[in-house]
Amino acid sequence: MARDLLLEVGAEEIPASFIGPALDDLKRVLTERMAEARLKHGDVRVFGTPRRLAVLVRDVADAGEDIVKEVLGPSAKAAFDAQGKPTKAAEKFAEGLKLTVDKLGRSQTAKGEYLSARVEEKGRPAADILQEALHTAVHSVNFRKSMRWADVDVAFARPVQWLVALLGGDVLPVVFGDVKSGRVTYGHRFLAPGAIELKAPADYEAALEKAHVVADIAKRRAQLVEKLASAAKAAGGRLMEDEALVDQVTNLVELPSPVVGTFEERHLDLPPEVLVQEMKSHQRYFSLTDASGKLLPKFIAVSNTPVRDEKLSLRGYERVLRSRLADGRFFFDEDRKTPLADRVEKLGRVVWQGQLGTYLEKVERFRSLAMWLAQQAGRAGEGATIERASTLAKADLVTGMVGEFPELQGVMGREYARAGGEPEPVALAIFEHYLPRGAEDALPTQDAGALIGIADRLDSLCGIFAIGKAPTGAADPFALRRACIAIIRLVLGRGYRFKLSAAVDEALRLLGPKIANVKRKAGEPAPREQVLEFFRGRLKALWGEQHRTDVVEAVLAAGFDDLVAAQKRLEALSLIVGRADFQPLAVAFKRVANIVEKQGKDVKGGSINPQKLVDEPERHLHTAFTQARNTVTGLVQADDFAGALREITGLKPAVDTFFDKVMVMAEDKELRENRIRLLTEIGALFNQVADFSKIQAETSAAA
Amino acid sequence: MYFQDLIFTLQKHWADQGCISPQPYDLEVGAGTMAPYTFLRALGPEPWNVAYVQPTRRPADGRFGENPNRLFQHHQFQVILKPAPKNVQALYLDSLRKVGIDPMAHDLRFVEDDWESPTLGAWGLGWEVWCDGMEVTQFTYFQQCGGFDCKPVSAELTYGLERLCMYLQNVENVFDIEWVKGVKYREVFHPNEVEMSKYALHESDPQMLFALFEAYEKECKRLTERQLPLPAYDYALKCSHTFNLLDARGAISVTERANFIKRVRDNARLCAEGYLQMRERLGYPLLKTPWTVGEQPPVLEGKPASDYWKTVQLNKPVEKKEKAEVARGA
């Protein structure tokens, strides 16, 4: 009869962000072990609160499934001697399986005939399997940081206090550190401090609910969201959306109990970002706004205990916030006494990266680079704003407020620039140069911030690569992947046309003295190539989300120096590759590409001699190509890549006839080379859009 | 509850559990952790259970007695339980009940907090304990001290006495705390705050302090070589405080700062090692006592601390490998 399984690890308060990943580990190891042992089971659920991690498996079979396996022994040749009598090897094999030689069979394998036996492998009893599986599971949870306690040699996020391991009504013996498993769990620390004896795994959730613990994370989150909404409504406001804060608070409590508090209205003249940050980052309070999105002087704190008298605990919540806001006001007032421009010099004492120098040096580099980019991208008119905003871009790093709340970098720069009477576009650019801060974040609304943002990130990218600290595997301490993707999004989003490779060269030139003496490992590509390769990787990933990988490859292979053009080529090509008539086209393109690749290198450069085109099909192809080339050049210049592709695909009949009727590899050297030159030029024309040889032929047509 | 009643209540609570109550260590320290009652005693296999008030000096926090929350010198109530009892959280919550914080009336929470002291080569994991959103205690399980693993693991509880008392007395300014009936914190400590802040932030003599730092550092090294880790540690503490004074005066640049911290840490390490050797020479006398506090769990998995320390190599040949490489390169 199938039984349920419960594992609960009871611990002292586990950090909120550790709970989800730890449950994933427990569930994964447990289900893997059951699968390996062929132990069938039903639904698997996890539960987690600051004080517990649990897995409940329904309907676990009594034992693993039996299977019959074929076991191979010695080869037939080695198993019997000349007289046909079994050898020692054969007897040993039979003995090992507790059989006699005459009960053995024979099996044909690729290597010849072998003695074999069909052996039944019995499934092990569920209790045996699970005892090991539970032991492994609790010992293999990986925490970002873990600790030892007492005399134990094992480590966990925080000390483990109890273990529940139940299979049906029976306790499975498991030991972790100084704790032995049993059937006793505990409810809410203060509301239900006594031991709770569990009769069966299925009672778990209800027993805890009775003991004031909502163990199911999704359920607790939903309760929190609902209670927050009604508390906000009762307070006459709207909850400021913050999913990450909801997730965090869900895992800070076992039973969410929101209370609404207030703060002094006079603080509302602080920048709203400061108020929100003060409430959330230390205190995990939710902010409230009015219907128009303006902050109200109110907050919601979430208590773990529904206290006897809300007013008493609110006194505490409000008091802490009062002193935090007083600090915030102090920083805001103090910071504004020194104009941002006067702080720039101080950046000369803040190290950005040991080898690459201070923030002041970085600012000077990316200011030049941003000016250069503005020239290239035809935004030279923004020069004055870019110059001023670059100079001030990092000055808020040495303000008291950003020292306290690093998350407010850029926001404070904008506010202090405004307070200091800088032009609004400068203030805005200081804030916007940090955008986008993540995959979901908005792009800058103005050119100055966007171009400074590109320059700042390109300087980081080139500098870090040049000193040999490029990201490896998961390690990316300077968040260069994110920086690179941000550059791509900025360039594409705002449609800047410049040569990426030239920008990389310029960035490296500006870094010059810092990276001049860096020794590179033998065989390592130059920083320029590494950075461009890094861009290729990000583009592949980014575009691969929406386009076929081979099409992305084909476009990238034809170059991505002009990112905007590359994206347009990709979009144009993606549109036609899906069409049924593209397949034969691809074949024709490939033939051209193959011949050019194989033979092209033996042919000296030089142009086609039209007089030497003797056969009608090649003369025809040449005429068609010459016409197409003129049109394509114009279309490419006008960014009409769909049109260019149409024109190119129009060459297909001429190309086909050429291949059918003309022998490219003619005996006559001049004739042969002239033909290869023609194909090379056609290949070059195609390559203005993509390297078609990279496009995979679809082997099986879609149904 | 008056300020001193708060101290007495905590003292009594922990004494009742079996802690001894040493008097504050008589040197300048930046945290209760730095007193030898904590830093050195957390090392090695022997039990150690103490609860004491430690006046704590933080020159950079000096605000001339003008800030309602920040002080040049405040008081920590420091509890070390080694090994950490199984019920340490419960014992701690009882102490809060005794000073009048009822968990059914307040939101009490253990919120993740990692503790690290770069000057001591020490770190641990634990929480800040929140009472209605306010931090009232730092709760840490020591993992390393002076670069050595802590085994058994100690629990360290650090109550910020002024902050806790402000909450209990419902006052907004630290100087309004009533020390005893009719006498406020202001009367006792305000002039001290004014003068100490003036000294640390404006009047100290950096040249003299740099010279003292050098001298203290040298003396600490010399004493560790003479196998006198206890006086050596006093000099390590003097180094640390001198560094704090220089730091508050703004006499140490950002780049030099890391180097000064390393110099203090290197000495703290030497003292830790010397202390461990001394306890080993003495045969770990406290292991022979039946001294425990709270519930002690059995050792089911892992080695007992006394066995573990037999495997720790003291007097490690320090950075020999690096030297060999330099030699090869030269």
Image (cartoon, grey):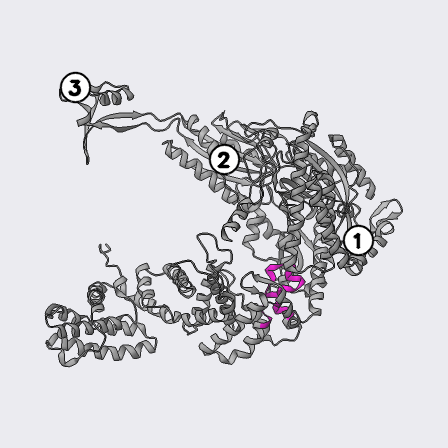
Among the 4 quarters of the image, the one containing residue A630: bottom left
Residue under pointer 3: A85
Task: Say which amino acid is labelled 1.
Answer: Asn
Residue under pointer 1: B173
Q: Chain of mark 3?
A: A
Q: How many residues crowd mark 3 within 10 Å: few (<14), some (14–19), many (20+)? A: few
Front-most of residues A451 and A48: A451
Q: Chain of mark 1?
A: B
> Of circles 3 and 1, which is in front?
3
Whether A504 is drawn above or below A82: the answer is: below
Q: Chain of mark 2?
A: A
Task: Say which amino acid is labelled 3.
Answer: Lys
Q: Are marks 2 and 3 on the same chain?
A: yes
Among the 4 quarters of the image, the one containing residue A341: bottom right
Whether A200 is drawn above or below B114: the answer is: above
Give the main secondary structure of the magenta stretch: helix
Residue under pointer 2: A139
Left or right: residue B122 compared with residue A135: right
Q: Earlier in the sequence, mark 2 or mark 3?
A: 3
Describe the element under mark 2 as helix, strand or loop: helix
Q: Which residues are magenta?
A: A391-416
Estimate the spatial distance between the alpha carbons at disc 3 and disc 1, rounded to whole Å. Answer: 101 Å
Front-most of residues B158 and A204: B158
Task: Say which amino acid is labelled 2.
Answer: His
Expressed as whole percent of the image width and height from the top left, the position of residue B123 reads 62, 44
Which quadrant holds the N terminus of chain A? top left
Please say whether residue A322 is visible from this viewpoint.
no
Expressed as whole percent of the image width and height from the top left, the position of residue A601 reads 23, 68
Q: How many residues crowd mark 1 within 10 Å: few (<14), some (14–19), many (20+)? A: some
Q: Are marks 2 and 1 on the same chain?
A: no
Left or right: residue B296 compared with residue B168: left
Residue A135 shown in magenta: no
